[in-house]
Image (cartoon, rainbow, N blue to C red):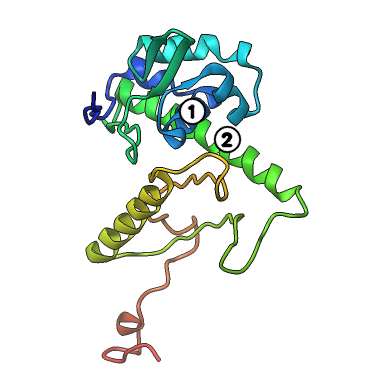
Amino acid sequence: MAQKKAGPIERAGDIELLASPARIEIVDTLEAMGGAVSVAELAAQLGRPADGLYYHLRQLAKRGLIEEEVAAEGRRYRSRTRPGDRLRLRYRPGATANARAVGRVAASGLRVAERDFRRALADPDTVVDGPQRELWAARGKGWVRPAELAEINRLLARLMDLLQQPGVPGEGTLVSLMWVLAPLQPKSARRGVEREQPATTRPGNKGKGKP
């Protein structure tokens, strides 16, 4: 039976379940593995003891964030999303329970990303340049127009599509990607320091452009 496309998760109580690095990794790994897997298979991919996963799996399945199957050989788990898709959160910005829960999930994801980065950086065999580069951390900041923001979103969506395409465990390189896109409020000038005015409005320079 084909899986139906799962809608975004919106309820704060459901989102809160993902505010745990262990559960974020479980969901990510089930999405990457595609089909239904046993706890032992999942534990092998995560590098964690199987006994430590049962509680998290039960909680995630109870809320419908993953799917549980009972087979002759035991329980098996799969992502609630179709192959090539991913679990999505619906944001409700403002002073909402949803926003608080989403913020905690983002913070947990950043902690996982920091841990992954540090582990890879400690490995002398990690590729850090060239077309097969697999480790990279950077931060950019700049003014973008609506068309440029649309292009940024398109590229980020394409990156996620590449990561979510069906793959075979053990073939190729297993990588993780965590990013944050956020609008910033321009900071006001420091107290006692005037903002620099554009050259066209400076006293004695009326009508002249910047060099």
Q: Residue furthest front?
A: 72
Front residue (pair 13, 129): 129
Tell me: residue 63, above or below residue 131: above
Front residue (pair 168, 139): 168
The label shown at residue 211 is none
Name which residue type carries label 2.
Val
- Compute the Cα span from label 2 to label 1: 8 Å
Q: Position of residue 193 (x, y in %)?
A: 49, 63
Q: Position of residue 129 (x, y in %)?
A: 64, 66
Determine the residue positioned at 54% across, 17% down. 39
- Callout 2 touching callout 1 (CB < 8 Å): yes
Query: For this view, does 27 lie left or right of residue 93?
Result: right
Tell me: residue 204, above or below residue 28: below
Name which residue type carries label 1.
Ile
Q: Quadrant of the C terminus?
A: bottom left
Q: Residues within 10 Å of mark 2 (few under 14, many from 20)?
A: some
Determine the residue positioned at 42% across, 67% down. 195
Quick one: SS at disc 2? Answer: helix
Quadrant of the rendered image containing residue 79: top left
Front residue (pair 172, 144): 172
Q: Find disc 1 in the rendering and name its residue.
A: 24
Determine the residue positioned at 45% across, 29% down. 30
Tell me: residue 140, above or below residue 24: below
Determine the residue positioned at 35% across, 89% down. 204
Query: For this view, does 210 lie left or right of residue 131?
Result: left
Q: Find disc 2 in the rendering and name its residue.
A: 112
Quick one: SS at disc 1? Answer: helix
Tell me: residue 181, above or below residue 127: above
